[in-house]
Image (cartoon, rainbow, N blue to C red):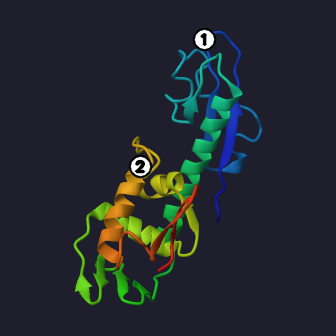
Amino acid sequence: MRRMVLLCVVAVSLAGLVPAVFQAQDVGQYASGVAPKHLKWNTPPGHFGLIAGYADDYLSKPFSMRELMARVKAQLRRTQVIRDEMEKIHAPEQTHKSLNFDNLVINLTRREVTLDDEILAMKPQEYDLLVFFAEHRGQMLSREFILERVWGWEYVGDSRTVDVHVRWLRQKIEKDPANPERIVTVRGGGYRFEG
């Protein structure tokens, strides 16, 4: 049975309550518009729904629509990341456990990268970044998207982290790191892995 995610924004204007963003795993759970009976309506601000384990986020008034939309988009991104990870876990066993790009081979089973049949020493984050690039070959990937998918949405650093790791990867896998052919910079956009 495929489960869907419902994002429900509830604005409560009673004294002492705050708007809450709910995320129910089953669509029908809150579809009636009636909150579960065990949610206490006199819960202090900042705890509405969080105590009961139903709200993932909240905003206290006054708040801007821009902030509300940013939080809703962040919640939907987190949901998509979780869904993608669950699909990987439940995906059928792959027959190919390596990604091959001419003289560059990424062995997914052993978490090992070889270039011209020589094993490259890589930090875990470099390996994860290279695999992410390889899985998205030919696609332009923004720094923010890479940061969110490789480092995770909870990472608080800036997108220059991606640039540093790309530079390190280029030093290891490019013939001429100053003129890269495998990991190409897309001006004003991010990076594209050419293989």
The amino acid at mark 2 is Arg
Image position of 71 (left or right of 155): right
Q: Nearer the viewer, residue 12 or 169?
A: 169
Q: Tell me what residue is drawn at x 71 percent, y 16 percent.
A: 13
In screen coordinates, is 103 left or right of 118?
right
Q: Could you tell me how many numbered marks the image carries?
A: 2
Mark 1: secondary structure:
loop
Identity of the residue drawn at 41% across and 41% down: 156
- Residue 16 is tagged as 1
132 relative position to 6: left or right: left
Q: Amino acid at mark 1?
A: Gly
**Mark number displayed over residue 160:** 2
Q: Residue at x 36, y 69 (%)?
A: 170
Task: Say which of marks 2 and 1 sits in front.
Answer: 2
Report the quarter where the N terminus lies: bottom right
**Residue 170 appears in view:** yes
Q: Where residue 58 sits: x, y (%)?
A: 58, 28
Q: Is residue 35 visible?
A: no
